[in-house]
Image: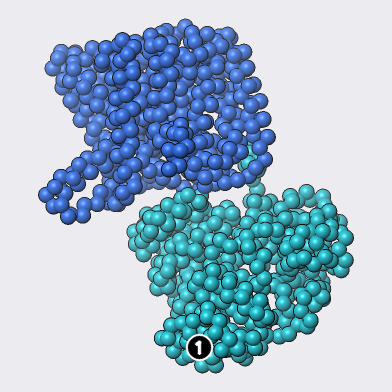
Chain colours: A cyan, B blue
Amino acid sequence: MKVLIIGCGKLGFRLASTLIDEKCDITVIDNDEKVIEDVNNSLDVLSITANGLDFKVLKEIEIGSYDLVLATTTNDEANVLISSVAKKLGCRKSIARVRNSEYYNQVNFITDELGIDYIINPDKATANSIAKYLLKKYLLMSDDFADGKVRLVDFNIQSDDKFVGKKLYELSGFENLLITVILRQGKTIIPNGETVLKENDVILISGASSDIEDFDKKHSHIKKAKSVKKVMILGGGKLGLNLGYILSKEKIETTIIERDEERCLELKEKLPNCVIINGDGTNFSLLNEEMIDSFDAFVAATGIDETNLLMALSVKQGGVYKSVAKISRPNYNRVLDRIEIDGAFNAAFITANEILKFVRGRGSLRVNLMLDGEAEFTELLLQENVKVLNTPIKDLNLPNGILISALVRDGKVEIPNGDTVLEESDRIIVFCRHDQLDVLKEYFYKSEKRGGILSELRHRF
Amino acid sequence: MNYAIAFKVLGYILALEGAFMLPSLVLSGVIHDGAFSSFLGTIAILEILAVIMVRVVQEKQKISPKDGLLIVSLAWILVSIFGAIPLYITKSVPTYIDGLFEIISGFTTTGATAIPNIEIVPKSVVLWRSVTHWVGGMGILVFALSLLPKLGVGGFQMFKAESPGPVAGKIEPKMSQTAKRLYAIYMFITVILFLLLCLGGMTPFDSIVHTLGTVGTGGFSSKAISVGAYSGYYIPVVMSIFMVICGTNFSMHYLIYKGKFKDVLKDEEFRAYYIIVILAIVFISINLFKSGYGKLSKTVVDSAFQVTSIMSTSGFSNTNFDLWPSFSKFILLILFFTGSCAGSTAGGIKIIRIVVVFKMIKREIIKVVHPKAIVPIRINGKVVNDEVILGISSFIYVYLIIFVISTGIVATSGVDLISAVSSVATMLSNVGPGFSAVGPTSTFAFYAGGYKLLFCALMLLGRLEFFTLLALITPRRISEN
């Protein structure tokens, strides 16, 4: 698949690196030479220093031969224009990033009239994921698969002696659950029964939703689960606005703290049901004035990662039930597991998930990148004639980086073992390290075949 | 520095070198020229080493720009060291250093020889020497890259370090595809030339040797008097055309393949290159004709052949140009330095750098008159950024410094000045022959071992454009400050 990415900021870069793992041929256009140099030093793509709005360049690179254009410059209007023109010039699909919510509300008009296939709004997508988490009854950060039948939770075992120092097969209460992955200091480990857990490991557990809820109840160190009624959002940027909008629709009492006075007025106009406070939210006297302790949840959504993480952490230590942070760079992945916040949301990753689903097409129901971008959980619908069917899993010789963590057949959730035989139209949830993406595609997707000595050499290296 | 990954890639490179020796092994087995066991032994050593190097290291890590430089430099040194073995064992050369000189001359597409009479050397050895031209021309790592797509971005670092010219550009999004495309074009040109030479009455073996020497712009011949052994105009004309083609930036060939003739004709380097070729041919023809060289047609063909041969840094000769009048020799000497286009198989300073230098001079002149004028340097309508310009200037300084110092050292061997100057120039630009004592009818055999080692270093420096190798040998405390 040939993909053109215009504008290589945080999102563009993330998309490029994700799509490289996907074996796409990528061309990147950016008008900043420094950006292009960075791209050349870290990604195997064709890079061009040019203005994406210079349509001569699009013609020069023969845009008609491309399958997908992703317009992710900082300017919404430019993105829409580029995607529309690219489509007119013969590119098969085009996706534009539109951040301004006023435009985004007219998304149907834009897609229909201008021929753009898909509009992504990272802030809105992030706001949705945050809201989804906040609205859930339980505390552990989780992901739903197969329409909520299967759930995956992250659980930090901290120094709990029910876990630390135990081998996995010694753990009790895991009859219907599967520990899919262990995250240890930013490294991803696929465990087996003999793996020993260490202090501060984060374990990813998959299972049927009801079983996971039981687990959550037992282990989340909170006497009883409570639903979130009051939310405080730090920072009234685009994310704050989107989140405020979703939450106030759900009739949740929302307070937004924003430093800029004019922005506050604007927010109030758009979100009449939210309380808007003008002030410096990193100042605890202001937070105490607003009685931070009476809130059920806190969302740190300023533009600075460090502020977000530390504020979320401080508030969580202060006793707020759920506390999450928005981050935009993957720099702090190594410490994210160790600091006690309930979740960190990276807009670029959330958007990349959407795009991946779009790129993989039929059969791919859901993609969920891990925070370092080196692995993913993916939900698949097995189609006819894919390689994994009709053989017990243990005889498939799947590599160590791939693990089938749950299976939904006829509406029932099963935790697969070595003897399980997969069938057509099973929905499965698979964990896959990205260096094994080839294998994933070979086994689970319908695809063109490759063979011979050269491909053998390729696999060796 | 990530030595583990370097080790692994080098293992693959050695395996490849062994594979490239196979044609010689087969030839030797068929015609029984006595070199069979030497090739078999070398291939065995290479493959065993390769298997060990590839197997031992299990690490999968990314290649940084620094690793790219290290891998490229070491790869070139290693393939030279092992490539020289068959020459030495078959006694084609008297000492191992001569073998090393010969094979580095092959890989760097220099084509200077230390073998006085090539016609008594086993044919399989002659073939191996020419195969190194072909591989070295486009780059042995580029070849490896086309087979190893998993190197990803690290591949681009190696490509940058190996490919000649101030800025290396991909023609396809993925490095491995770029490498494949380049080799596909290269292969195509090779096959066409081979067929044309066969049609011209060369024996298949001589055709192969001359084809490999031409497309790699190397210059090794299977004849003692090089192309002079072939009378008539057909062979020199065909070879001239192909030397010019192979001195052209290969991305131009790619554009032609894509049907974008206009873009090719508009390219500044492409135009400058052809203008220089034509002007040089015209000047030398006039000069030769006036001095009573002979028939006009012969004068034009010989001067065209010699101009394209020197400018593309091949170094074939069909006549002893050392006997030509001084003005013609002067023009040839200039061409020693200029070389051909970036991104081709040729050596030298490269036309693009010279174009930029002239534009810099023009800018300085404008600045004298209008001190505050903003005068960006443009190539093909695009502004060249200051880093690239600085890189070009430092390239030329380094070239000159190394040129001057080496000439001084070579002069201590007792050769005359013009021999010393042309020896160094021909080595740095990977041309082959020089003037006077190292003219087209002589060889480099008479230089003592130490001088040959210096030449080896100069050839590698010239081929890898200095900085790749210099970065490797610069002491850490300088390079990291």
Q: Which residue in the protein does label 1 denote?
A: A277
Q: Is residue A361 visible?
A: no
Question: Left or right: where does residue B247 sit relative to residue A336?
Answer: left
Question: Left or right: where does residue A434 sit relative to residue B238?
Answer: right
Give the x, y percent position of residue B214: 39, 25
- The answer for which chain carries disc 1 is A
SS at mark 1 in the image: strand
Give the x, y percent position of residue B281: 22, 26
- Furthest residue toward front: A285
Q: Is residue B466 visible?
A: yes
- Furthest residue toward left: B369
Q: Is residue B299 above or below residue A18?
A: above
Give the position of the C terminus of chain B as an image quadrant. Answer: top left
Question: Left or right: where does residue A206 sit relative to residue A448?
Answer: right
| Image quadrant assignment for residue A216 | bottom right
The residue closer to the viewer here, A301 or B52, is A301
| Image quadrant assignment for residue B345 | top left
Residue at 60% across, 29% down = B15
Q: Is residue B196 above or below residue A199?
A: above
